[in-house]
Image (tube, rainbow, N blue to C red):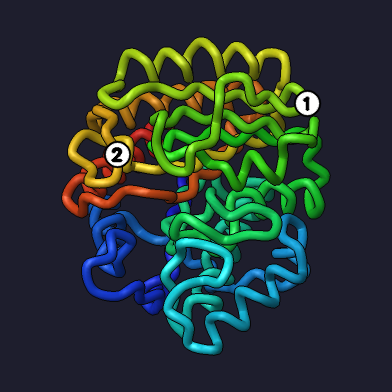
């Protein structure tokens, strides 16, 4: 009932020595599955038209040009790239679209997509923060376009605010974006007062925050909002850099907390969307911590 999707092409996205968003992250996340069988769906790349559901064609062309030219850094922001990065990012988005297919067609009740590079900082016209394309945003639009889904909820527990996702959807009443994140912290966005057209909800917390603040926000604020919004599909930007000991964040979530967050999200999906839920890997830069947190998340997803 749980589909695990991962495309080894992710290991061709080489950010160079010492970079936190390193190739070894993919292996660490896969190790967290504990030998669970991956979905047999053939890997596929998102098309340019699918990218254009969320990104401008000018930006898509620029990202392609930057990578193929052999640049080290994306021209629009702080994202290290290599010649293969554009193709890898297409496959990251494509993996998430395959996850949507499996869940919406009823082949799986939920899915977890282990992808690189992450995506939630990529806005309509800019890649930044290690991200080229916003895979989870593209997945939301794809579900609406292909399956006629009316309302999609995206919840982001990465330690960094998903500014790209907010940018794409803050004027869209059909997609609800919820984020817990450290503040002040990169990228400096996600004020509590940022509500868009009423379907954006930010819960920034100071360094040192953990279970009490974040689980309460999900169980009370987000779950309460979902009683009104009633999503047809639930998506998770699953960033595990909010775990205690991550080098790029100062939250204090434990592995058991990720299991409880996952259970909370599944309860929301069960209540409103027939259990349909797709989770997408975002951050998480302590390799041992990433393995353990992914293990907790994956185990909870399978406890149906």
Location of residue 57 in the rendering, given as x and y in whole percent from the top left corner: 77, 69
Residue 1 in view of the camera: no
The vertical placement of 290 against 71, above or below, is: above
Instruction: Compare residues 226 and 61 and report the one nearer the observer.
Output: 61
Q: Quadrant of residue 213?
A: top left
The vertical placement of 1 against 62, above or below, is: above
Indicate the secondary structure of the residue bearing disc 2: loop
Q: Quadrant of residue 55?
A: bottom right
Q: Residue at x 21, y 34 (%)?
A: 244
Q: Quadrant of residue 254?
A: top left
Instruction: Compare residues 213 and 37 and report the one nearer the observer.
Output: 213
Q: Which residue is mark 1?
A: 197
Tell me if 295 is positioned left or right of 104 in this view: left
Instruction: Compare residues 212 and 297 and report the one nearer the observer.
Output: 212
Residue 281 in view of the camera: yes
In the rendered structure, are the residues bearing label 2 and label 1 in contact, judged by CB atoms less than 8 Å apart? no
Location of residue 62 in the rendering, given as x and y in whole percent from the top left corner: 66, 75
Q: Residue at x 83, y 44 (%)?
A: 148
The vertical placement of 138 against 58, above or below, is: above
Tell me if 186 is positioned left or right of 141 in this view: left
Tell me if 174 is positioned left or right of 117 in this view: right
Q: Decide: few, some or many residues near mark 2? Use Cα within 10 Å; few <14, some 14-19, many ≥20.
A: many
Look at the image and tell me in which quarter the C terminus lies.
Answer: top left
Q: Which residue is mark 2?
A: 249
């Amino acid at each position: 009932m749980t589909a695990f999707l991962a495309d080894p092409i992710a290991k061709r996205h080489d950010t160079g020595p010492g970079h936190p968003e390193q190739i070894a992250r993919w292996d660490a996340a896969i190790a967290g599955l504990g030998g669970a069988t991956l979905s047999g769906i053939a890997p596929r790349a998102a098309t340019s038209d699918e990218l254009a559901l969320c990104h401008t064609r000018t930006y898509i062309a620029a990202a392609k040009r930057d990578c193929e030219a052999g640049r080290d850094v994306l021209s629009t922001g702080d994202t290290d790239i290599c010649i293969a990065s554009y193709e890898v990012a297409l496959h990251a988005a494509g993996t998430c679209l395959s996850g949507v297919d499996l869940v919406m067609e009823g082949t799986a009740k939920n899915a977890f997509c282990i992808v690189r590079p992450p995506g939630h900082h990529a806005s309509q016209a800019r890649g930044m923060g290690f991200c080229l394309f916003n895979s989870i945003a593209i997945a939301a639009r794809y579900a609406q376009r292909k399956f006629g889904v009316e309302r999609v909820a995206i919840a982001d527990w990465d330690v960094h605010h998903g500014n790209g996702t907010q940018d794409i959807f803050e004027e869209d009443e059909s997609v609800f974006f919820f984020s817990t994140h450290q503040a002040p912290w990169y990228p400096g966005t996600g004020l509590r007062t940022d509500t868009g057209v009423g379907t954006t909800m930010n819960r920034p917390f100071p360094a040192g925050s953990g279970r009490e603040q974040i689980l309460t926000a999900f169980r009370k604020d987000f779950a309460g909002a979902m009683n009104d919004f009633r999503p047809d599909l639930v998506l998770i930007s699953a960033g595990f850099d909010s775990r205690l000991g991550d080098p790029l964040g100062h939250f204090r979530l434990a592995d058991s907390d990720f299991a409880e967050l996952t259970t909370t999200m599944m309860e929301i999906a069960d209540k409103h969307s027939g259990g349909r839920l797709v989770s997408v890997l975002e951050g998480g830069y302590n390799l041992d911590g990433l393995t353990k947190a992914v293990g907790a998340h994956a185990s909870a997803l399978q406890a149906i």
